[in-house]
Image (cartoon, rainbow, N blue to C red):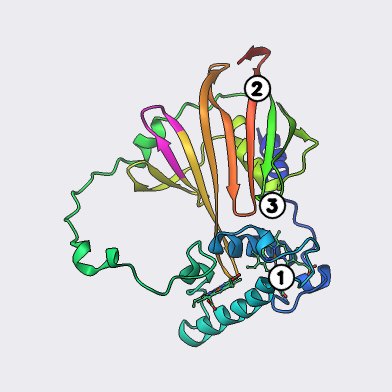
Amino acid sequence: MRIIIAAMLLLFTSAQSSDLPVEQTKKNIKTLQGLPTSQLIPVMAFMSNSLGVTCGHCHAKDWESDEKPAKETARKMIAMEHDINARNFDGKTVVTCNSCHQGHIRPNGVPSVANAGWNHAAAPQPAVALPTADSLLARLPATPGGAVTRVVTGTVERYNGRDDPKSGPFTLTITADKIDYKSELAHPPDANRALAVFVSVPTPKASRVTGVDKLEMANGEVWTIDEAHGVVTRRHRELVTPLGILPEEIEYDDWRTSGGTKLPFVARWLRADYRVTFTVHDITSGGSSRH
Ligand code: HEC
Ligand code: HEC
């Protein structure tokens, strides 16, 4: 089991090579100097998510090009964000791109009549009794014990909103001492976290209940649990970047019983820069094939 977990860490975390400041690894960095290179894409994804755009809104074909005026505006906005926070919030990242933009290229400075105070007569919320973490976890299928051999095959698709979706076959092979993911299609390695559901690992510990169907796990992820079906439908994680918090989600769908375990036949990883969908065609568990 220890070997499996070690192998999983290799497969499911992106390798951290020497993290040079981004101005040493990229060609045209003026505002983000000093930012570790590993943070560049999360920062870019955070800005894209805040404005509701894809990378192409600010970038021409060559990433270093300053051809699009929105890129230069973004530099000014990054400086403005730093300045607002330095002057007003002790330098903490309080005001971010999303505080103003909220998914729009141009923030709307005019409030909506629908938001008038008299329209928001706060009806007293009926007190909802939250379930306990244990009762929510108890609904999940038991993790199969012992060494599991499992081969998951299917199609992986990646989409970034700039190019057409691209897809190709993938194979995930889990044996007693090795986890092997194969696909010719390149995609962010973080997307492989969606595949962890196929590996026999103990359910992470829950730390607290944050809603009727929401559990905050000890690793910081929030899981949405479909109690009726006893499955995890969504995993939410937040990544702290110097400009703001970047959300990332994993959705599971089309659960079927395979080799005595409930497994999802669709696993989708979602972040502002990419949507990566794994559609399973076949799962072979301990020698038996079900689909
Ligand atoms: C709101 C505008 C904006 C969006 C959207 C955006 N970028 Fe950027 N990007 C910038 C700015 C500004 C810089 C330069 C930062 C600086 O000068 O310090 C930059 C720099 C870069 C660089 C470094 C290029 C070089 O060699 O100098 C890369 C790579 C990059 N962005 C990738 C992306 C990706 C990938 C996305 C989409 C996930 C994206 N960007 C979305 C504004 C944006
Ligand atoms: C305090 C509010 C505020 C914050 C914070 C903010 N912006 Fe803006 N941004 C605006 C406003 C307002 C405009 C529109 C200005 C105009 O209409 O002339 C704008 C315009 C822009 C534009 C030009 C849009 C276009 O036409 O392409 C870009 C790009 C942009 N912002 C990026 C960012 C980024 C990236 C961040 C975070 C680093 C950010 N903004 C943070 C208020 C804000």
Mark 3 is surrounded, within 10 Å at the Cα level, by few (under 14), some (14 to 19) or many (20 or more) other residues, namely: few
- Of the residues shown, which amino acid type is indicated by label 3? Arg
Secondary element under disc 2, as helix, strand or loop, is strand
Image quadrant of residue 258?
A: top right
For ligand 1, tell me if the residue under mark 1 lies within 8 Å. Answer: no
Across and down, in percent, residue 63 comes to 78, 64
Per the rendered image, the range of residues in magenta is 223-231
Secondary structure of the residue carrying tag 1 is loop
In the structure shown, which secondary structural element does the residue marked by tag 3 occupy? loop
Q: In the rendered structure, which disc, 3 or 1, sits on the residue that comes first in sequence?
A: 1
Q: Which residue is mark 3?
A: 162
Q: Nearer the viewer, residue 227 or 112?
A: 112
At x 74% / y 79%, what residue is drawn?
30
- Closer-to-camera residue (61/142): 61
Left or right? Give the position of 156 relative to 259. right
Q: What mark, if any, has residue 281 been given in the picture? A: 2
229 in the magenta segment: yes
Q: Is residue 21 visible?
A: no
Q: Residue at x 70, y 78 (%)?
A: 31
Residue that numbered label 1 is attached to: 68
